[in-house]
Image (tube, rainbow, N blue to C red):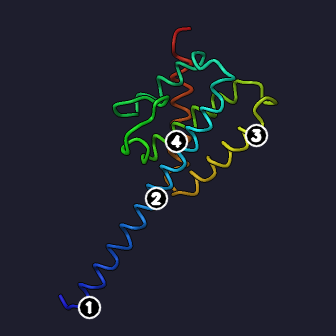
Amino acid sequence: MSHVNKHLARTLEQQHKRSVRGLFLKIQDLNNKCTLLRKRLEPHIDMTVYQNAIDYVNEFISHTTILNLKFITNTQNLEVLVLHTLLLSYVLENEDPRSFEYEQKLLHEYIQEIFDLNEHAKTLFINHQEKMLYYIQSQPT
């Protein structure tokens, strides 16, 4: 392989690494924003009412919970981010919409940012949304 081809390959690899790292940092930033939004809601709502939704989300989180999100493997994970927004969405849908208009707006912006990350995000969101609702409805009350 010529020197030019090796240099080109190395440059493309570095560019790809930066792109992937940037994606993970965007995911982490959105997860942090979702955590802040949830913490903003918690004093005003009873999170125990949403235990089934929390349990569903927690099935996909390693070594911690959505209410105590830690570890880079969780905070930089697209699936965890999607589930985080689904939980927030479910909570806000079941609360008085007039009380949380600003939070609804923020969450809608976050979801749109997720959809803009890559083509897989929206499919992941829709699939988990259906599965989460089925899981919640199938739990004994």
Task: Work out whether residue 86 or residue 38 is closer to the camera in this orientation and state it.
Answer: 38
Q: Which residue is mark 4?
A: 82
* Crowdedness near tag 1: few (<14), some (14–19) or many (≥20) residues, C-alpha within 10 Å: few
Q: Nearer the viewer, residue 17 or 112?
A: 17
Q: Earlier in the sequence, mark 1 or mark 4?
A: 1
* Quadrant of the image containing the N terminus: bottom left
Residue indicated by mark 2? 23
**Which corner quadrant holds the C terminus?**
top right
What is the three-letter code of the residue carrying label 1?
A: Val
Quick one: 118 or 30, which is closer to the camera? 30
**Between marks 4 and 3 in the image, the one whose residue lies nearer the viewer:** 3
Classify residue 129 as left or right of residue 16. right
- Tell me which corner region of the image, top left, top right, bottom left or bottom right, holds residue 134: top right
For the residue labelled by badge 4, is the local secondary structure a helix, a strand or a loop? helix
For marks 4 and 3, give the CA distance.
20 Å
* CB-based contact (under 8 Å), mark 1 and mark 4: no
At a point 38% along the width and 30% down the height, the residue shown is 64
First in sequence, mark 4 or 2: give its number.
2
Circle on res. 102: 3
Please state which amino acid type lies under the numbered disc 4: Val
- The type of residue carrying mark 2 is Leu
User: Which label was assigned to residue 4?
Assistant: 1
Q: Can you give x and y, in whole percent of width and height, for residue 8 in the image? A: 31, 84
Q: Is 81 situated above or below 4?
A: above
Q: Earlier in the sequence, mark 4 or mark 3?
A: 4
Contact, mark 1 vs mark 3 (Cβ under 8 Å): no
Residue 118 pos. (x, y %) = 51, 57
Q: How many marks?
A: 4
Mark 2 element type: helix
Disc 1 to disc 4, how far (Cα)?
A: 41 Å
